[in-house]
């Protein structure tokens, strides 16, 4: 049965009967009442289901009124801010990194400056070296140009090595011959060669007429160059064909090409006693066989020289003969005009590295 609600007249009579209550403000809560006092709570939830949010009155009363965020309380988005400590920490980190970077830059200043200075020095040295190379090439070219264009012994002498010693040889060599000048175009190839600690340069020259010219130069202490005339013309004190025909027993220094051989005959037939070499020279097909006694000084000199060449060209089955200056001598009363003694290896290649004393008759 539905409960009858009181009407307005009954409610008025009820309020008139109630005695007004007196409220007292107490300085402190009596001890026997401390446990009985409760802060009012809102109406039970089952009686107020229509409300979408039910704040806890206790929580609200305990908060500072100025700090209440209504949007947060009623389901809105709360604006969260980072604590001040994080900003301080970030600032310290940034300042630390900046300080570290600055310190590294300052610490790197000496090494960077050193690297820059070193690069500048290298650049200066490179420019200086290029200038020196250019000057060297100019001096070399001046020498070769003057040498090739000369038409007389007097014109050629200033450009040759050991001019005082070779002048009479040049005069004898060119006697009755026309000295034809050659037009220098440029160097096709240049190679530095060390002979007994002396500085030499081997050059292959291009001529204006399309020809090639090989030449050996020595660089003097003042930086200028001189042509080795003796090796250029393959100077021989006696013409090769004349030497073979006359077979003089006196020793003679000859510029020859040498290679190993095994022609053991006549007085040189003992293979256990002798080493045999084939000897030729420029502009002639005639050859001789030269012999040395094994284990002699000259045998070791020649063998050592050829061994270095052979080791360098070990993949070449038949290496070209090598140029040497040898003192040769025909045996007296020999049964063959093709066999000679090799008394001395005068010089490697065809060049006197140092100017020899005036040669004895027959040596030069």
Image (cartoon, rainbow, N blue to C red):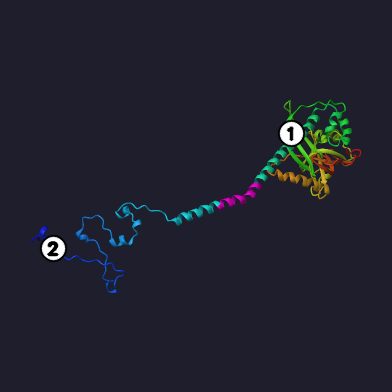
For marks 1 and 2, give the one nearer the viewer: 2
Question: For this view, does 104 lie left or right of residue 33?
Answer: right
User: Which numbered dot is residue 52?
Assistant: none
Q: Which residues are magenta?
A: 99-114
Q: Nearer the viewer, residue 226 or 288?
A: 226
Q: Nearer the viewer, residue 151 or 18?
A: 18
Please, what is the dominant secondary structure of the magenta stretch? helix
* Number of other residues with Cα within 10 Å of mark 2, as a class: few under 14, some 14 to 19, many 20 or more: few
Residue in the picture at 88% in, 30% down? 171
User: Vertical placement of 355 versus 69: above or below?
Assistant: above
Q: Which residue is mark 2?
A: 14
Q: Is residue 218 magenta?
A: no
How far across and down, in percent of the image, does residue 59 sit? 31, 61
Where the N terminus falls, by quadrant?
A: bottom left
How far across and down, in percent of the image, does residue 244 sit? 85, 35
Where the C terminus falls, by quadrant?
A: top right
How far across and down, in percent of the image, does residue 178 sit? 84, 25
Query: On the image, which quarter does residue 17 sit in?
Result: bottom left
Q: Which residue is mark 1?
A: 204
- Is residue 204 in view? yes
Residue in the picture at 74% in, 44% down? 309
* Number of other residues with Cα within 10 Å of mark 1, as a class: few under 14, some 14 to 19, many 20 or more: some
Q: Is residue 109 magenta?
A: yes
How far across and down, in percent of the image, does residue 224 sit? 80, 36
């Amino acid at each position: 049965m539905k409960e009858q609600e009181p009407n307005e007249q009954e409610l008025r009579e009820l309020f008139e009967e109630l005695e007004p209550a007196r409220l007292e403000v107490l300085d402190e809560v009596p001890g026997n009442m401390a446990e009985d006092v409760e802060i009012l709570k809102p109406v039970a939830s089952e009686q107020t289901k229509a409300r979408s949010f039910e704040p806890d009155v206790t929580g609200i009363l305990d908060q500072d009124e100025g700090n209440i965020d209504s949007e947060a309380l009623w389901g809105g988005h709360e604006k969260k801010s980072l604590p001040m400590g994080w900003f301080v920490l970030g600032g310290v980190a940034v300042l630390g990194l900046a300080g570290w970077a600055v310190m590294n830059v300052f610490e790197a200043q000496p090494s960077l400056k050193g690297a820059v200075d070193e690069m500048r020095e290298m650049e200066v040295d490179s420019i200086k070296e290029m200038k020196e190379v250019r000057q060297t090439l100019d001096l070399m070219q001046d020498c070769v140009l003057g040498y090739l264009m000369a038409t007389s012994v007097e014109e050629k002498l200033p450009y040759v090595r050991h001019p005082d010693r070779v002048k009479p040889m040049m005069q004898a060599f060119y006697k009755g011959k026309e000295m034809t000048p050659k037009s220098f175009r440029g160097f096709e190839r240049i190679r530095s060669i060390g002979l007994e600690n002396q500085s030499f340069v081997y050059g292959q020259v291009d001529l204006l007429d399309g020809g090639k010219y090989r030449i050996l130069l020595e660089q003097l202490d003042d930086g200028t160059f001189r042509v080795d005339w003796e090796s250029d013309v393959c100077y021989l004190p006696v013409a090769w064909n004349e030497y073979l025909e006359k077979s003089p027993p006196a020793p003679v220094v000859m510029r020859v090409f040498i290679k190993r051989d095994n022609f053991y005959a006549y007085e040189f037939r003992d293979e256990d006693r002798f080493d045999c070499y084939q000897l030729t020279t420029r502009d002639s097909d005639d050859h001789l066989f030269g012999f040395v006694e094994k284990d002699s000084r000259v045998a070791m000199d020649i063998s050592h020289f050829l061994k270095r060449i052979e080791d360098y060209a070990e993949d070449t089955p038949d290496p070209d003969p090598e140029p040497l200056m040898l003192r040769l001598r025909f045996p007296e009363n020999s049964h063959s005009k093709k066999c000679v003694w090799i008394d001395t290896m005068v010089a490697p290649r065809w060049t006197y590295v140092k100017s020899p004393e005036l040669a004895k008759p027959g040596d030069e």
